Amino acid sequence: MNVRKTRSGQSTVNYWKGKLFTNSFSKNGITYDIPEYYVRLRYDGITKKVRLHTSDKDEAAQEALMLFERLSKEGWNAVRKGQSRLAGSFTIEEFCESFKNAVRIMDDAPRSISVNQYIRHLRQICSLAGITRLQELTPQAIEKARDKYKALGREANRSEASIQNSLGIIIRNAAACFSKKARVIMERHGLSCENPFAGIPKSQRIEPVAAISEKILARIWLELPLLRDGDPKVKAKAASSRDYIKIYRKTHNGKAPRWLPIDYSKPHPEAYCAILLALGLGLRANEIDKARWSWIKFDSKGDCIFEVRKEIDFTPKGGSTRFVRMPVDMYTELEKARTSLESTYILGGTEKENTEVFGYRRRSALRIAAAWLRDRGVETGKLRGNPLHRLRKQFGSEVATSFGLFQAQKLLGHSSPTVTAKYYAAQTNLPDLTHVRILG
């Protein structure tokens, strides 16, 4: 094929730098900017817009020049072949951005909170393996990350079951970034890659749930009002926050503490409400954090119904709305503990500014609730225990024992009864057996 003559300057990077432009797209009324550059190429009477694969202008100009030279020599077919950038040239951070862009245009896309967990765990795997580029993310690198995670867990005296459970979650979430649906979309936009997690074990050793003892439950209900109003028997924290931080830095190589000590002599109504919602309605932590007063309604019979539903900053797990009957006296308690008439949230506070960023609005309240429960024997001694979620399992166990597995599955919002039966349905009391008859 004859080489096409070019205009003066077209063979320089500076020429193509002046031809670059950016693009955007809209979905559901929201405009998203695409960080990568585009360029228009013309050959044989045909002009096409071509997406480059970098947000760096110098790199984009270099790629545009390379594509133009290939186009001039081999025609449009050569450009189409070369347009999908090889996975090896992507950094992990570039891949994460491509995955987020793919999710934005995906049908039945995962929740934003899930997407951020997927990316966070992928970064964790790469950090443990000591890699920064996608081509380095091989099954061998993933196994190296597994080995390092296990070693760190054993150094911290974690149980093997705890280490295995955490690894299963991390690997399963990281692998979700390479779902078939996501890879198809990314390939259409210039990134072609295989799933490096194919064949990697993702199993967990989740222990079947056991019911919380009656003694612990009785103590929780007895002392819960003291969490709401403040416990006068608890000595108030004398040292100021500044003094605590100063002492902490001296004993932790200059590091600042993540949390300050909890003063239980002061009222903690938000933590009180969090425990009520977990144990009384079986809500997940994120559902507790995003729960609105508008989710509570009274029907024509006077029954109080709690509806877990989609909001601008919250999507129910599984995507479906569910209803739970709330005891009226529990509603009264929530109302008495309400700290702000202006807030639409049961735990108070305002909506997060960026709803796509992973995290809770009222993390401090959830932390206080978890610490208070640990002090009373719920998940005590477990480094990775989740006391609030343990209350959710207790709720499921109470419902399953009294009303059956089907009701427990529906009230917990599970898509399958298998999960409910295996992990959320411990027996809370023994039935009275009357079929035995001793005669004589």
Image (cartoon, rainbow, N blue to C red):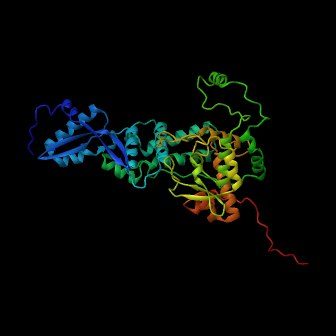
- Note whether residue 144 is visible: no
* Residue that protrudes farthest toward the bottom in the picture: 440
Q: Quadrant of residue 397?
A: bottom right
In the depicted structure, whether residue 134 falls above or below residue 240: below
Q: Residue at x 26, y 35 (%)?
A: 60
Name the side, left or right, on which 27 lies relative to 228: left
Image quarter of the C terminus: bottom right
How many marks the image carries: the answer is 0
Nearer-the-camera pick, 403 or 7: 403
Q: Quadrant of residue 361?
A: top right
Q: Residue at x 74, y 37 (%)?
A: 230
* Residue that protrudes farthest toward the right in the picture: 440
Name the side, left or right, on which 409 lies relative to 42: right
- Tell me where residue 63 appears, x and y as whole percent: 24, 37
- Note whether residue 234 is visible: yes
- Tell me where residue 201 appears, x and y as whole percent: 50, 51
Nearer-the-camera pick, 294 or 100: 294
Q: Quadrant of residue 366?
A: top right
- Tell me where residue 112 appears, x and y as whole percent: 47, 47
- Tell me where residue 321 appears, x and y as whole percent: 54, 58
In the depicted structure, whether residue 104 falls above or below residue 56: below
